[in-house]
Image: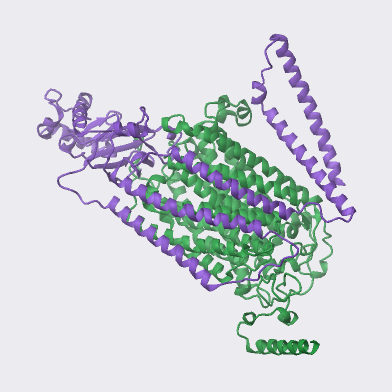
Chain colours: A green, B purple
Amino acid sequence: MSTISLHDTHNHDSHDDHGHHKETFLTKYVFSQDHKMIAKQFLITGIIMAVIAMCLSILFRIQLAWPDKSFPLLETFLGKWAEGGRIKPDFYLALVTIHGTIMVFFVLTAGLSGTFSNLLIPLQLGARDMASPFLNMLSYWFFFSACVIMMSSFFIQTGPASAGWTIYPPLSALPTAISGSGLGMTLWLISMVLFVASSLMGGINYVSTILNMRTKGMDLWKMPLTIWAFFLTAVLGILSFPVLVAGVVLLIFDRSFGTSFYLSDIVMGTQVLPNEGGSPILWQHLFWFLGHPEVYIVIMPAMGLSSEIMSVNARKPIFGYHAMIYSLIGITILSFIVWGHHMFVTGMNPLLGGVFMITTLIIAVPSAVKTFNWLATLWRGNIRFTPAMLFAIGLVSFFISGGLTGIFLGNASLDINLHDTYFVVAHFHLVMGSAAIFGMLAGVYHYFPKMFGRLMSNKLGYLHFWITFACAYLVFFPLHFLGLDGVPRRYYAFTEFEFMQKWVTVNVLVTWSAIVAALAQVAFLFNFFYSIFKGKVSSQNPWEANTLEWTTPVERLHGNWPGEIPTVYRWPYDYSKPGAEQDFIPQTVPFSQTMSSNMPHDFEGNAESERIQKEWEALEATKETKLD
Amino acid sequence: MSLRKFISNKTIAALAVIVTAFANTSAFAQAAAASTAEKPVDMGPVYKSAIFYTMAFLLICLFIAILGKALKVYELTREAQDKPKGINWDNVNGIIFALFLIVGLYGVYWEYTVHGKMILPEAASEHGKKIDSMFNITLIITTIVFILTHIALFLFAYIYRHKGTRKAYYYPHNNTLERIWTIIPALVLTVLVLMGFLTWRSIFYKIEDPNNKPLSIEITSSQFAWAIRYPGADGVVGQKNYKLITSENALGIDFNDKKNLDDQIADEMVIPVNKPVRLILTSKDVIHSFYMPHFRVQLNTVPGMTSYFEFTPTITTEEMKAKTADPKFQYLFLCNKICGDGHYKMQKPVRVVSQQEYDEWVAEQGTYLTDDLRKAFKMPVADAAPAPAAADTVSKDTAAVTTNQTALNK
């Protein structure tokens, strides 16, 4: 699907002089080892998966809003899963499960990190390609296979996995417990192993590229925040994803080879199962040891992208560059010791609950610092509202709204009554769903010229942003109150409970908002695919940004720079520097060319440079007095 | 150029669709008019058809395309006449942000007051009151932060929208500011953590009051039902063993344990007000979650692991009916962990009553050990005296013991 024949038309013979062998269609578009092409493959696969997952969500939203209406069209498309035009309970659970899995793993992990780490790490660091282009290619194809296997579970008799995206055993381990735990779950597990292999290959590649392949002058403290975010995300992934694989392999053993890692004392109906000695809680520990870092794997690249985009479009340096990095590091470290807050009410030892509550609420501090720094970046800026900028601001809004409700859920005592209710649904859809998607969309709008050499339509972008932004709030804000009323998530219908009936009308509002938001994505999809072929041709540096990627030619060569790789002299955020001619100074401009705008702290205590600067300033002063 | 071509193609296609649809609806209308000459046309089926909505969407797309085209023409003519650029989109977006702030703040107020009134009534348990007051404190703090940060965010977006005449203020960092907004959240969170931690401990580490011993109730979850077991006169729910589960002995009660003989089974959970209740939570098959929203009680039921939750109900059902002004009000507990396709139906009613009403009710409940079970386990049916009294007599019953022994050995 993503063979990307929709690519540009640049003449691929032109860089034979770089010593590359002649490319064929297969090596260029399919088994490409060029990081930019792989990024596009990840992006387009991610977009397709996102559209699929979005359609699934619309299906189950329809069921929630009109639980007793029949939609004959559903039967036409879904056959036995929507007999009589109504989605069946087990298929409903399959829908929420696969929606969650695709969105979290395939869209917001692979689609986001895969796209922008691959695209930006070599470009912003000044490298010709990734450390291992071959591994990079493998990473994409593992991801692609994982997607295909996951989707194939819709075409088997027992249906896709349906134990929730967290697939807690014993429900996920016993095919007799739910039909989705048959072959569908096996496919889910296989898909996930491939997916983790893919993201490990990607992660190792990102880390080694960032540590080893920076251009001359690009020390760690001159890297753009995007790269810092990708770097820490990759570290998180490398350390936590293997734990998921361990958990998954044990679950495969339990399911297929009769072991009892997660199973004990189980009676299905009156049939006593032979498993003894396992613990379902073990799975939850293993799963959330990945699962919690995972939400930061999802949000950190989005944060990095919007930091960069907000700085460029506010024409202002990012406020507190160092604080931004330290808070990312803080989040990275802390995210490993908070997984237990997903398990406050599992019956885990209450002492552990107390400890995890403390670590969880500490993580709010670096998050708060990031938020305030973003606000300070906007303050007294000169904000250009490109669609990318709008989405970056949207991310900040969602991150605040969703982050604040995290303070409720991180508090073990409050979690007792909120756990697994719609409050949780609202919380993570805002803070990790909407915020991360907005970061990703901001990245797409901003880096589209770098990927395809053309610009997307701004006006369609505005339309897309405003409808999506308003509808996302209309969808998720009311859901908090369902949670506060004790309405559990993953309920097929609210018809069985007297106290939930009053929420059905709210569900209608939510579903309509979700449908409108989904239709607004048509504006994006049209804009995206249309602009690939017919968009306005971009200039080399359309946003007047400082970072290295905008010094590469619009034509996107294999090897990135036609000649020598540029050297870096300064940090990436010299926007609107007083004394400078333009309101941006690219990283490649040496301080010797910007004598009028240099500041004492620019030289980081280099005595020689400071002396030269002082001499120049003295000279200027005498010139001025002479002129007077 | 190509855009124009595309749009004209699309226009033609859309027009064709509209014409066909119009023909169809008018055909409908004619048919309807023919049958019931005077009745207005029934549009119900039209509104239900997917084609109606698809067409509506296509129409909107067409409208947007035309609008886009018009904007483009407008901008091009401005450009051709050497006038300043047509629409300043920075202004437009900035103003929408300001409007969004106003509408959004009103929306939040509306949500808090309208949907906020539809949430759970006050906590009906002792620890629930602590949870509620902590919830309120957290809500106040987070609402203030939410409003202030959003005012800042959207106002900054409005005030500092791009103007050609202005240059942004170069302001890379300010250590004092950064220290302030690290330390203040840290302090606030410390307070919240401490409160949460102390409440959490008070919920899970209870010191037993010898004068007010808790009533033990055992809950067993299975797909998709709850079983409630009361301890009987001895106040202790007896042992059970999942290996003993059969269709007669659905909970796998171990009759070796004489504490089981007086245990009672109930169809609803009835608890006396102001008396601590100790829930013993177990599961037969998959993980479920025992959730009593009105009492702020929740704990998962996990196969192979017994968990406990102790709480004290403080408001009877009757009082709550008066408080909520809802004569149909009923406490309940439900399943709050995905457990299969019947997950959305798992519930049981709960009644909080006075001690006296409870005593009357509990006396009426049958024992778990029914005559059928006695027969099945070859226990004497004849001297099946009222369960509490039977406790010591039956313990001598060796037949029952051997039956259970063999069952266990299976």
Q: Is residue B396 left or right of residue B132?
A: left
Counting from the top left corner in percent of width and height, residue A271 is at 35, 34
Near-viewer residue (A431 or A98): A431
Q: Is residue B79 left or right of residue B225?
A: right
Q: Is residue B214 above or below residue A585?
A: above
Tell me which corner region of the image, top left, top right, bottom left or bottom right, holds residue A584. bottom right
Where's the C terminus of chain A, which quadrant? Answer: bottom right
Can the viewer see residue B221 in this picture?
yes
Near-viewer residue (B208 or A197): B208
Tell me which corner region of the image, top left, top right, bottom left or bottom right, holds residue B152. bottom right
Q: Residue most toward the right?
A: B81
Can the viewer see residue A355 in this picture?
no
Q: Is residue A353 left or right of residue A77?
A: left
Counting from the top left corner in percent of width and height, residue A124 is at 68, 67
Q: Is residue A339 left or right of residue B147?
A: left
Counting from the top left corner in percent of width and height, residue B211 is at 14, 45
**Number of numbered discs on residues:** 0
Counting from the top left corner in percent of width and height, residue A101 is at 54, 47
The residue that appears at 45% across and 57% down in the rendered structure is A289
The residue that appears at 66% across and 47% down in the rendered structure is A466
